[in-house]
Image: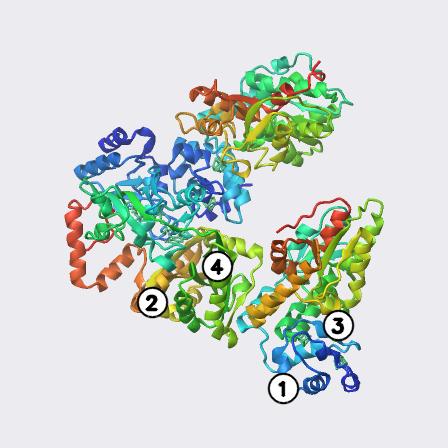
Amino acid sequence: MQEYANQIHRCFRCGYCTFPTDYSYFNCPSYRRFRFESYSTGGRLWLTYAWVKGEIEWSEHLAEILYSCTTCKNCVEQCPMKFASDIVEWIVGARSDMVEKSKIPLEVGRFFEAVQVYGNPLKLPGSERGAWADGTKRYESGDEYLFYVGCLGSYDENGQRMARSLAELLKEAEISFGILGSEEKCCGNEVYMLGEMGLFQLLAEKNIQKFKEHGVRKIVTLSPHAYNAMKNNYLKFGADFEVYHYTQLLYDLAKKNTIKFSQNQAKVTYQDPCFLGRYNKIYDEPRQILQGIPGIELVEMERNREDSFCCGGGSGNFVMDLLAGGEESPGRVRVREAYETGADTLAVACPSCMIMFMDAAKEEGLEDRLSIKDVAQIVKESLLLEQTT
Amino acid sequence: MLGLKFDKTKCSDCKPVSCLVKCQYMDLDRDRARIEWQKIVNGEDSFVLEACTTCYACEEYCPLGNHPFYLIVERQEEKGILPSPRPIITMWINQCEPVGRFMVGMVQEKALSFCFLPAFNLLVGGKLFEDIAWSSIFGQEFFCNAVYLHYARMSVIKERLPRIIENIEKQGIKELVCLHDECYGTFTSLAPAYGIEVPFKPVHYYEYLYDKLKEYKDVIKQLNVKVAYQRNCSVRLAPDTDHFVDDIFGLIGVDRVEREYDRENALCCAEVIRMAKGYELADDLQKRNIDDMVKAGADYCVFNCPACWDSLAEKVARRGIKPIHMIEICKLAIGEKPALEV
Amino acid sequence: MSDIYEALVEIVGKDYVSNQKEERYFYGRDPGLMKPHEPDYVVMPRTTEEIQEIVRLANKEKTPVVPKGAGLSLTGLVIPQKGGIVLDMKRMERILELNEKARYVIVEGGTTHGVLKSYLQKHYPSLRHSMPDSPPIATVVANAVIHGQGRLTQQRGFNSDMVSGLEVVLPTGEICRIGSCSVSPYWFSKGPPLPDLTGLFLGWFGTTGIITKLGLKLYPCKKIRDVMLFLTDRAELVPDIMLKLGHTEMMEDIVVSTQPIPLRFKGNFFILVFMTGDSDEEIEFKRKMAWDTLWEYFDSRDGGFVSITPDMKTPMMAMPSKDTTRFADVRKGGGFEYSGPIAPVEKYPDFVKKLEELASNYNLSYASAARVIDGGHCMMFSFSYTFNRADPDEMDRAKKALDEAAEFSLDQGGVIWKPNIDEQKMMMARMDPNTLRLMGKIKELLDPNGIMNPGNWEAK
Ligand SMILES: Cc1cc2nc3c(=O)[nH]c(=O)nc-3n(C[C@H](O)[C@H](O)[C@H](O)COP(=O)(O)OP(=O)(O)OC[C@H]3O[C@@H](n4cnc5c(N)ncnc54)[C@H](O)[C@@H]3O)c2cc1C
Ligand code: SF4
Ligand code: SF4
Ligand code: SF4
Ligand code: SF4
């Protein structure tokens, strides 16, 4: 099973992976936050190898180092070696080894437990999963899309705002869709990245089964994390659905003129979510939606697209926040960068980015100067009035 | 050892000695040409063997198909003449050596040959290749090896070509659409000249494009542009395919400008000549060629060969002419975007 | 918790000190083949004052201090041979000042080459520095400390020759300025017209002090860069080719490489000739100069310029060259190290012979890149061997090959660049005894307690 163990020695600890393409500054969120080389990709790989070889014992600190990676894939993008595309899989493999040996940080254990017991990492009752959605109908067979909302969209206050915006937009565009409400379960993307393969399989199988029961053919997700899991990691468990991220859908609607925009004066910068950008190469659609809105000026942060800097929320950190604390926590770094562009709005396309940045903006004292909105909300606010009944 | 099917008597009866008289790099009248050519035929030394730029053109000039250029290559090798510096020849021989790395797509009976040119990964796409894009072969194992004509290494061709042909046959290919016309020339001219059997049908990609375009007749948008055609060295091995250029241009509304350096009088991209003879001749050829394109008022320069693209595209673009590969101008005509840019 | 730990926390804050196994493990080794030895503490200072305090503490406690950049010199120079404190300098990462008219930049002790390159490109596109081919996290200061070489070395000498001033924390804790900046606000000269005291710190591997600021000369960055590739299959021609190209005084950089795989490289020496220009005409002229200067080899068919396609060109032109790093994993083993003698260019053919001989004796994959220094006064020749980190036997063989290469290059009159502790000993054994004594005196004077990177340059 653990393919990583006989590959991981290949890392040269050269540090290319800590940078973006132009080497302007460190771009591995975990290295940037902690600054010991042990927290860089190379550090993690070398320490994991040392553990595999038995040169060091497992320790809480070792596990912390391994788990402070947000699986953002900057390293995958930058490592010059042939194995580059495997790096995150190696890290995930090592984590799954630790999971199997029950040697994981406390927070990670709690995360798994919550998902197991509650079906979400936030420990909120499954029955309330659809509570945000008043008025949004349940999925019935024959509906074109299943709107998969995800844990943050279902439970987090800001996530819910995103989910509502999207649901309303879809209604206005007369898309036939429905949600699963209390029947929905965690997508398992984080569980996978944290290395709990058994639990991931269980979640994937249950979700696939449920989707099939309902006759689902097409899925649109709020979260890029769910999009990634369903699009790429569900396949081996028999998924055969078409999966879309909502920005793809909105892009399509805008292109076909199904939704039309009025003026919306704003200077907007856009955060590429790792699971949309580096994982699935979707960079243009969200930007084109925003640029299609009259009045919106899109400005780029210095590091964008393949070089985007992670919000710090990946791999369960939107709950555990192992990279929190201090000015150099990724979320804070990134809102500062967004603010420096002169933008008044930081657009996100991911509920994890949303909650990380909401907190970070508060800590940076930027909450009044930089509003954080997701693409769906911006689109909704920009609709031609005749459409918004 | 495989031998060149060369008919001495054709040459002794030949009046025009076009092979050398038409040569763009040597200024020989008929008498002188006949003398030098007879030396070559008889295996004697001739300055021609040193002066030859390996432009392939005499293969086209010979009206009797007697393969003068192949004979030149044979003679150069026999005499140890190095048309290019030795290390360059070594590099070429090494880098294309078949080493058992079969790079194949989902090959069917009809397949595309990408030769050993990665550019085709970009060029092949869209509606024109819808059904066939994945049925492809690439790399050393399928490389036609004709390039060694430039390097006086017919021996390498004779040794490798039969293996290559076998490799292709083993893929179960019955019809091979050659995207690089050097491959096409190899299978239709070079192989037969040495009696090497080709157990599949080579198809020039021009013919393929022409047929495809006819299928898309309804969506073709007349381009109404003037193009200069960059006719490359390997066309000389199979000049009979040249009419497809006009046929395709006819379908898509393209005007192949009349210019000095097209058709039989075409100038090659000069990159091999640069390595062989130095920069002065190469720079001069490229300049004359591009000046000629400009003078003829071309909007586009259409390339047949990706190697010509590498040496000329940027230079052409700097003179205000858009470089485009033949595949891509066809894409343009059916409303698709070109993939290869400078 | 030990007193030293608490004291370090007091100085830099607890987020920036570790005495945990994981950091000690990682900072106890480098990517090369020298034996690991763990530090007791890893500390990441942010200011010169913090460093001062750390040094004072170390003197009091008689504990070693080892400054570290990215640890990429590969020869174990940052492995704390006697334990103690490793100072990871990379939080001292700022670019403090750039003087456009006097063409220098002042960086901190841990600023990386990558960040400096990016900064210049963005803010001062007409200025550049001599970028080495080490991964971009390599630090500017450490690279000067080991007398590195970069893209401008062919024209301007070692990267350390381009230093224009230093601020140093002496082993006894005083802050000291070196060069024009010791008497003037400007950092334009590392010594002249004063006594050049940078010699007390550059080349010393941190044994004489910790550099906290460094002035670096910047040079014109022309609008266009280009590269040509000349091949020859005769090693004996390489020295003259290097010198002839150097003679033109027009080439940015000249690097000769040889390696048996991939097959395309076999049997030839690849001579990369870089050039820069502000216009196409300038490039064109230099291109012709390169041709003309090597015409005799072209004429004799012993060498020639190969046309390079745009996709071959991109990786050749990259700064730093990623291909150099990729060599570590060509055989999926994740490791390589090189012995890099600095020697007269005429040694090239002998070195190549030895390179191949060692590879075959020890059954190793090899490569070599030789960079011309300062128009041809000497070259850096690398004996590079890959090894598989999961194969102790191969690591052992690679180490032996490197040891032999070092011995050989010394015998040939070369001087070993960034020597590991064993190679330092080899050189000191051959050194003029009075020179050695002078080195000893300097060390004793500057570092009476012997706390600075002990094990290195132990000149007795
Ligand atoms: C793939 C590859 C390619 C390379 N190519 C090149 C090349 O082209 N040119 C080249 O020059 N090198 C090259 N190198 C070697 C090396 O990586 C570089 O020279 C690099 O700049 C060293 O910097 P570092 O920060 O890694 O130094 P380190 O290894 O961290 O330190 C080197 C020495 O400097 C000392 N030191 C560090 N910081 C200070 C300080 N602030 N004050 C005092 N002493 C200090 C250390 O104690 C040590 O003795 C290459 C290495 C690799 C792996
Ligand atoms: S993961 Fe790749 S880029 Fe990062 S240190 Fe290892 S080899 Fe270098
Ligand atoms: S995935 Fe991101 S956080 Fe993890 S090691 Fe790579 S760059 Fe760092
Ligand atoms: S090769 Fe052809 S053109 Fe030349 S002499 Fe012979 S027959 Fe005539
Ligand atoms: S190949 Fe070209 S240069 Fe050589 S003889 Fe024939 S026509 Fe002349």
Instruction: Answer with the quadrant where ligand 5 appears in the image.
Output: bottom right
Which residue matches tag 3? B60
Residue type at the position of mark 2:
Pro
**Marks 4 and 3, Cα distance to the nearest angstrom?**
40 Å
Q: In whole angstroms, how far apart are the C-alphas of marks 2 and 4?
A: 30 Å
Q: Are marks 2 and 4 in contact (CB under 8 Å)?
A: no
Q: Where in the figure is residue C54, as x and y percent of width and height?
A: 23, 36
Chain label for disc 4:
C
In the image, which is nearer the foreground, mark 4 or mark 3? Answer: 4
Measured in 3D between alpha carbons, the distance from the residue under mark 1 to the one under mark 3, in whole angstroms, is 23 Å
Q: Residue at x 74, y 48 (%)?
A: B331
**Cβ(mark 3) to ligand 5 < 8 Å?**
no
Residue A228, percent from left and from top:
61, 32
Residue contact at pointers 4 and 3, CB within 8 angstroms: no
Q: Amino acid at mark 1?
A: Asp
Q: Earlier in the sequence, mark 1 or mark 3?
A: 1
Q: Which residue is mark 1?
A: B45
Residue A103, horizontal then vertical, whole percent: 45, 31
Q: Secondary structure at mark 3?
A: helix
Residue under circle 2? C344
